[in-house]
Amino acid sequence: AEFLTGGFAALVFKFYETEAGLSAGLVAAAVVLYSVWNAVNDPLIGFLTARPTRLSARLGRRFPWILLGSVLCAASFALVFAPPGALRGAGLFAWFLAAICLYDGLYSTWELNYQSVFPDRFRDPSERERAAGIGTVIGVLGIAAGAMVPTFIIRYGDRASYALNGLVFGGAAILLALLMLPGVRETPAMIARFMEQEAARKKAPSFTAMLRDAFGVRNFMAFILLFFFYQSAMLCMTASIHYVGDYILGASTTVIFAGMLAGALISVPLWLLLGRAVKSRQTLLAAAALAMAALSMPLMFAGGVAGFALGMFGWGLAFGGFWMMMGPAMADVIDEIVLRSGSRDDGVVLGFRAFFGRLAYATQALSFWAIHALTRFADDPRAPAALFGIRLHLSAVPAALLVLGALAFLRLNRMDAATAEANRLELVRRGL
């Protein structure tokens, strides 16, 4: 998941703006339309794939969708970066929009179901924390690989190298998907719980009823808002690095991404220690977001490859903490929704999480378009104003987004450690 997301987010805007020749305004328009598609696509896929199928009793309700979606999604990644060379203007715009909508529909099919497995399979708080710690290391490696692998393949100004990069990503992602499958198989106990739930209920809840239940949970809305602002900041920062390499440094960005990876990996034991001292995962999540905001600002003034790498190392220290707390914090919120609804129908809930994650692409695209228009990037991308604009969407914009997300989260969230534990015990008592 993070390998594909990293490779997509770091390159897609720059490729279509500076290599394929689509104007920044049209790139932003395609991404906004893609976000509108996600408003229906993600929650609906979450709802439809949560229904039982003929394979549910044998393979579980999630595993077949994870298998089908992950392999097809990996294959479709290459299409995003391989528009026919003859396409221009409206034709190129149509290809871009169709390719990202296809890729995202397949991505959502497997990733929503993958996310649903976590709170169902890992139920004890300590189990969730251990799983999140392992997942953070693997996820950060995935993000770093998604960002760093292209630096060995693409060449600025060489459009064919981006197509080759897409093929490499597609092939590698298919291999990773196959390696993932044994770990996401649903256990016999999980399958039995689901089949008992389906047999016991008189009728399945409607799509609108599930939406109403999810949006009625204040802590869910707090998490979703923070996740949206975090994802927007993350996309702005990672997509900016290649602009830094091409126009500010004129050098490879491998070392810069390596700095982020090193900071994130080193941070894991530090955040595990903090997790033992501060029991509320919600509090630690907000603290990590504010730390990311503060550590974004030095990048406004960084100079040289070493300066940017050091800045990204510091940012990675906070990023690792956010990444590690995000899964357990979300699982606590899912527990609350399951307790209120009386059944583990979390597909729509995770569909809205996915939607707000994809909506962040629109935030990134619109901010890039606005800044590039104001700084006249298209006229001279190496002019002082254009270079200042790159620093803005690398540093100040992500910092502002993270502060907004943390403030909204702290204002709305009411989930503390005692409430999370009480919810868990009640779920055990009710067999959920």
Image: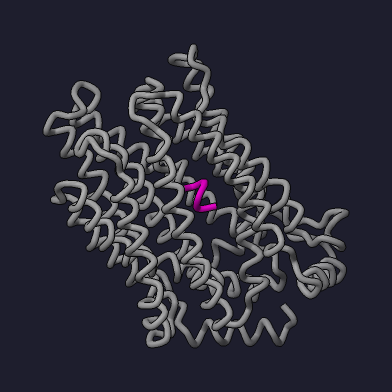
Residue at x 17%, y 36% (from the top left corner): 387
Check residue 344 for magenta coloring: no
Q: Indicate the quadrant where residue 183 lies.
A: bottom right
Residue at x 67%, y 44% (from the top left corner): 71
Taking 237 as reference, is 159 left or right?
right
Q: Compared to 110, does 324 lie above or below?
A: below
Residue 410 in view, yes or no? no
**Percent coordinates x, y for residue 379 in the rendering:** 20, 21
**Percent coordinates x, y for residue 394 in the rendering:** 26, 46
Q: Residue furthest top?
A: 86
In which quadrant will I find the C terminus? bottom right
Q: Compared to 40, does 228 lie above or below?
A: below
Taking 121 as reference, is 126 left or right?
left
Residue at x 44%, y 60% (from the top left corner): 140
Towards the viewer: 414 or 347 = 347
Q: Indicate the quadrant where residue 114 lies.
A: bottom right
What span is in magenta?
1-5
Taking 184 as reference, is 201 left or right?
right
User: How has the structure been colored for display?
Assistant: one colour
Q: Indicate the quadrant where residue 425 lies.
A: bottom right
**Percent coordinates x, y for residue 264 in the rendering:** 37, 64
Q: Compared to 91, does 293 lie above or below?
A: below
